[in-house]
Each structure stands twice: as structure tokens, then as C-alpha cells.
Image: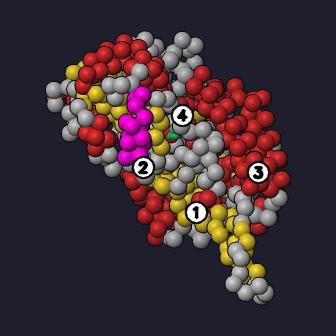
Amino acid sequence: MYADLGLFINGRLVNIEGGDRSSVHNPANDEVIGSFPNASVSDLDDALASAERAFSTWKNSSPLDRNAVLHQVAMKIRQGYEPIARKLTLEQGKPFAEAVAEVLSCAEHADWHAQECRRIYGRVIPARDSSVQQVVIREPVGVCVAFSPWNFPFSQAFRKVVAAIGAGCTLILKGSSDTPASVLEIAKLFHDAGLPDGVLNVVSGDSSMISEYLIASPIIKKISFTGSTPIGKRLASLAGAHMKKCSMELGGHAPVIVCDDADIDNAVKRLVPFKFRNAGQVCISPSRFYVQANVYEEFLDKFAKLASGIKVGPGWETNSTMGPLVHARRIQEMEEFVDDAKRFGARIALGGTRHGSAGNYFDPTVIADVPEHAKLMTDEPFGPVAGIAPFQRVEDAVASANSLPYGLASYAFTTSIENSHFISRSLEAGMVSINHIGLALAETPFGGVKDSGYGREGGAETFDDYLTSKFITQK
Ligand SMILES: NC(=O)C1=CN([C@@H]2O[C@H](COP(=O)(O)OP(=O)(O)OC[C@H]3O[C@@H](n4cnc5c(N)ncnc54)[C@H](OP(=O)(O)O)[C@@H]3O)[C@@H](O)[C@H]2O)C=CC1
Ligand SMILES: O=C(O)CCCCC(=O)O
């Protein structure tokens, strides 16, 4: 259990008990572990007023002050990550070691944004007339709203928080109803680090009501969403209707191209842990494996063998290397992927069924000879299921990789410079990782193309969506 949760508005935790509340369940055993308040319109108005009031000051804050708060948060994370990680595992299910890694990665995001927020440069444009001065300054867009997902409930919210407040914006943050405690921990960290009241506010409750109400508010100038493509399209159309800036980090269905000149052992060693990390509930999880025909059986055997060593169990058990799926409906979805692949003649090389009868556990699953038109090769599994298919020519594998409307992460393993250049330049994706897994670092841009969304989090681009350029010319 964890203490009952509240809303965090204007620097205070409110609605901690009573009122309209919803329960939070432990995905490992479906036990109730806590509850959170369902924000009312009045609560949302309080959050809007708080963020708007705070923006009038925070927009003019010194980069040194923002730098100090962000570095202080990084320090607090490194000192106090364990209880946060325990709550994360309790509500999301991932192994404790993964939860610790997720929380600690945010200390790096905080440090990166502390450094970068001092480099939000404008520019002077040489004028045609020497008596004229022309400058471009970059200003924070205003009050923002962010919706973060349940799969990385701390880090995916945190990345939005550090970008918004580092740019001088203020923020209303809503996490997933499956994992509400993690985002509240972020608000407490920033409050304790000296972030002024109202710069960061956290609400919870009915996501549809909250997003429709906040996005329509004239106080909100920008939205950021991480989640499914269907919901992303719905929110982007709402943002469009109200002319709000928008950044979307949506679904993916990451292709992996393994060429016959690849180091197969290296590929297997890196891909198996990353495929089954967080039970595959990762938007950049490798999920469509295209393996060149003459190394296909070798790769398949080694991949399935290494995956068979994964220990499925509760995240708090030290020997668990894969936890449950976040909610029960995902079990049914995994079963549909397996049944559909079998109907199309695919071969189950490992797993294929739920694990046990209690908790949302599904066995690590490897399915071979999956045809292009099978559901597993067209729809994002977002679970511990890998679809593998052979290819003859590298061009054919790239064509298959690009055949879906997704374009988030992509991977390739090859020792050929020619293959590496062709693949990395031809893949329609926001991110390409070759011969290793090197994405989602604080200093590198994270985001997609096509139906995987737009905008970037992290890297030198991280503040772009929270700033606007103002051109000033003076004679
Ligand atoms: N890109 C990513 O990192 C993520 C992608 N996904 C995608 O979502 C799919 C399944 O996850 P699932 O949770 O069922 O997906 P949903 O699209 O139902 O929910 C994803 C997230 O969006 C929020 N949400 C749902 N409706 C709205 C709304 N109208 N306004 C604002 N927020 C909303 C949810 O919050 P709440 O739970 O409170 O309703 C949840 O946090 C996966 O297949 C994957 O493609 C999911 C998580 C992360
Ligand atoms: O699935 C997502 O929401 C983002 C994945 C981030 C992975 C990471 O931080 O390592």
C-alpha cells in the first residue's frame, strides 16, 4: 500500500482524502494499493489559475535560478531514489532494478536541462541599414499541459517537466490513472528543491474530461502527450481546434534488421534484454525482427535460448527479470497476437501463453516465420512478444521496415559500412541504433516521425517546443 494521493496545486497537496476517488491496483496481484482524487472542474480551474499566476514571474526567472533548481532535483534523486522506485514497482510492476534505473536516469535529465537552460540563445541579424538593430529572442510559450504514460511513469513525465520549466514555462501534469503516485513524487522533489509554488501542478482523474477541459482553456498555450497513437491523434486535433502548440510521443513498432554479416552473438546479447525490458511495454522496444535468410535459424535459436532464461515474477522479488503487464486487458491483447500469428502459419519458438493464473503475467514469447500481413507485424504489441521473419535482400528488409505508419525507433546489426549507411539513411524513423542500443539518453533527441508523433525530448532540441521566437527590429 501507499498513502492516499492528492492533487498538487500551487505548492500544496490537496484532496488527500474523501471526495470522488479511484483505486490503484497492483498489476502483480490486482490488490488495491491506494487511491487518487478525480479532479473536478473547480480543481482544474485552481490549477490553471496557479500556473498562470506563477508564469508571470517564472517566465522572467534567471537561467541561473532554473539551473539551481534542476541541479538540486538531480541531487535529491541520487540521494532518495529508492522509495520512489519502490512505489513505481508497486504500481507499474516492473522489476525493482528497472525502476531504480528509470528514476536515476532522471537525475541525468535534470542535470542536462540545468546546463542547457543557460544556452537558450537568440541571435542578432546584421541589418541592411546600419541604424537598425535586428534581434531574435526566444521566449517561453506560457502555461503548458502534459499527459504522461504508465509504462515509464516517472521518467516520461519527468522529461516533460524539466523541458517545460527549464524553458521558463509553467505546467499542469497529468499522469496515467494506472500509475499516479510516480508523478506526485516529481512534484514533491521540485517543491523540496525550491521550485516556486504554481510552476508545477499535478492533477489526476478522468483523462478525457481533463484533457478536453484544459486544452480548450485560453490559459493553456501548449500540450505534450506520450501514449497511444489513437489518443495522440485525438489530442492533436483538440490542440489544432484551439490552436495550441503540440508535441506527441506516440506508439511505435520498432523494426530490427539483422544482416548476414552481423555479429549474431552481439545482436542477441543486446536485443533480448531490451525486447523484454518492462515486459516489452516500451515504445522503442524492438518488436519486428527481420533476419537475413542465411543466419535466420542461428539467430532464432540463440535469441529464443537467451530469452528462455528470463525469470517472470513480481517486481519486488530480486530474481525477477520480467514483471507483469500493467493491466489485465493487455493479456487478452497478447493472446490475440499469438493466435493470429498461428492462424497465418507462424511457429512458436518460445512462450505464447499467459504465465500462471494470477497477476497480469505473460511468458516471454518468440514467434518465427511471421508473415508480413499478420497482426504482430502490423500492430504494435507493446508486450513481451517478438515477431521474427527472414529476408533475402537488405533493400527488402528496409521496405518491410518502412511499410507501417509508425516511425519511432529502429535498429540494425551489420558489420558492413555500406549496409549501415544504406539502412540508417533509408529507414523512416526518428531514431536509428546500429550494432547497439543507444537511445533515450538525456543528451540525445527522442521522438518519431509519421504516426509516431512529432517534437523531440532531450538533446539540444529539448526546449524547442516550449519556446517561441520573437523578432525585434529597432531604428
Ligand atoms: N509512446 C509511449 O510511450 C506509450 C504508448 N502507449 C501506447 O498505448 C497503447 C496501450 O496502452 P493503453 O494505456 O491501453 O493506451 P491508452 O491510449 O488508452 O492510454 C495511454 C495513456 O493515455 C492516457 N489517455 C487516454 N485517453 C486520454 C485522453 N482522452 N486524454 C488524455 N490522456 C489520455 C491514459 O491515461 P489514463 O490511463 O489516465 O486514461 C494513458 O496514460 C500501447 O499499445 C502503446 O501503443 C502506452 C503508453 C506509453
Ligand atoms: O516507452 C516510452 O515511453 C519511452 C521509452 C524510454 C526508454 C528509456 O528511457 O530508456
Q: Earlier in the sequence, mark 3 or mark 4?
A: 3
Mark 2–mark 3 CB contact (< 8 Å):
no
Mark 2 or 3: in front is 2
Q: Earlier in the sequence, mark 1 or mark 3?
A: 3
Mark 3 or 4: in front is 4
Mark 1–mark 2 CB contact (< 8 Å):
no
Out of 160 and 32, give the one closest to the viewer: 160
At label 3, the amino acid type is Gly
Q: Which mark is residue 438?
A: 4
Disc 2: residue Cβ within 8 A of ligand 1's nearest atom: yes
Q: Quadrant of residue 329?
A: top left
Q: Which mark is residue 222?
A: 1
Out of 94 and 305, give the one closest to the viewer: 305
Circle 3 sits on which residue? 11
Residue 140: x %, y % from top left: 69, 64
Q: Earlier in the sequence, mark 1 or mark 2?
A: 1
Q: Residue at x 33, y 50 (%)?
A: 405
- State the CA–CA distance, disc 4 to disc 2: 19 Å
**Range covered by the magenta-colored residues:** 414-427
Out of 295 and 10, give the one closest to the viewer: 295
Q: Earlier in the sequence, mark 2 or mark 3?
A: 3
Circle 2 sits on which residue? 452
- State the CA–CA distance, disc 1 to disc 4: 29 Å
- State the CA–CA distance, disc 1 to disc 3: 22 Å
Residue 405 in view here:
yes
